Amino acid sequence: MRIRQVVPLLLLSLLLHAGSASAQDAPPRIAIANPGRILSELQETRELEQKMEAEVRQLQAQLQERNAKLEELRQARSAFKPGTEQHEAKNKELLQAGADLEVWTRVMQAEQQRQRKQRMKQLFDKITTAIGEIAQQKGIDLVIADTRPDIPEDMDDPRYTFDMLKAGLNQRNILYYSPGVDISSEVIATMDARYKAGQ
């Protein structure tokens, strides 16, 4: 059994034990939330994706410009006979420009990845905060992340192998729940309202 499956069970066991320690204690209230669904359905996520796509297009345009300048240098070098001082000078200029472009590309890619990770972490922190607030308002003691992968209806699809099915079933951390314990929709509504209000 994997750690991600064991931890919720241990927490549940501790809460059940604590709840049974005294006859006067109320049983723990448990809910679930699907972080993947929440993340994909948030208005903020959609706008972030649009913003990142625009940034990618902007970087691609800059890359095309830099490649065009590199081609201009290549054409300028070809105007001189190999072995001449002018050819050697243009060749050094071309090599330097190529190295600069490679460094620029790596830096831009690293910066883009850094920003994407930072935005994702900030958004996930907002999700967990909203889950905690809603749980407190509803008197919920434990919220378990519903991270079950989707199992396709069409089992005849040759792209979906037996090993993929087995892995998906093994990753299912919740086997049954009453629809009323899923607070994902409330989290989405709360976060969308805050986002529209600029909070």
Image (spheres, rainbow, N blue to C red):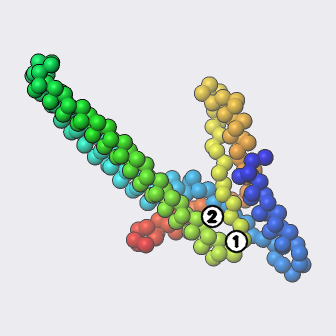
Q: Residues within 10 Å of mark 1 (few under 14, many from 20)?
A: some
Q: Relative to residue 128, is residue 198 drawn left or right?
A: left
Label number found at residue 164:
none
Disc 1 target residue: 140
Residues at discs 1 and 2 in contact (Cβ within 8 Å):
yes
Q: Secondary structure at mark 2?
A: loop
Tell me if residue 75 can be seen: no
How many marks the image carries: the answer is 2
Q: Residues within 10 Å of mark 2 (few under 14, many from 20)?
A: some
Could you tell me which quadrant the C terminus lies in? bottom left
Where residue 74 appears, as percent x and y from the top left, is 18, 27
Where residue 76 appears, as percent x and y from the top left, is 12, 27
Tell me if residue 145 can be seen: yes
Picture layout, residue 151 above or below residue 52? above
Label number found at residue 183:
2
Residue ranking furthest to the bottom: 24
Q: What amino acid type is highlighted by mark number 2?
A: Ile
Q: Residue at x 57, y 69 (%)?
A: 129
Q: What amino acid type is highlighted by mark number 1?
A: Ile
The foreground one among 30 and 171 is 171
Where residue 152 appears, as percent x and y from the top left, is 63, 37
Task: Say which label, 1 or 2, has the lower sequence index.
Answer: 1
The foreground one among 18 and 195 is 18
Marks 1 and 2, Cα distance to the nearest angstrom? 10 Å
Q: Secondary structure at mark 1?
A: loop
Image quarter of residue 80 = top left
The foreground one among 112 and 127 is 112
Q: Residue at x 56, y 68 (%)?
A: 130
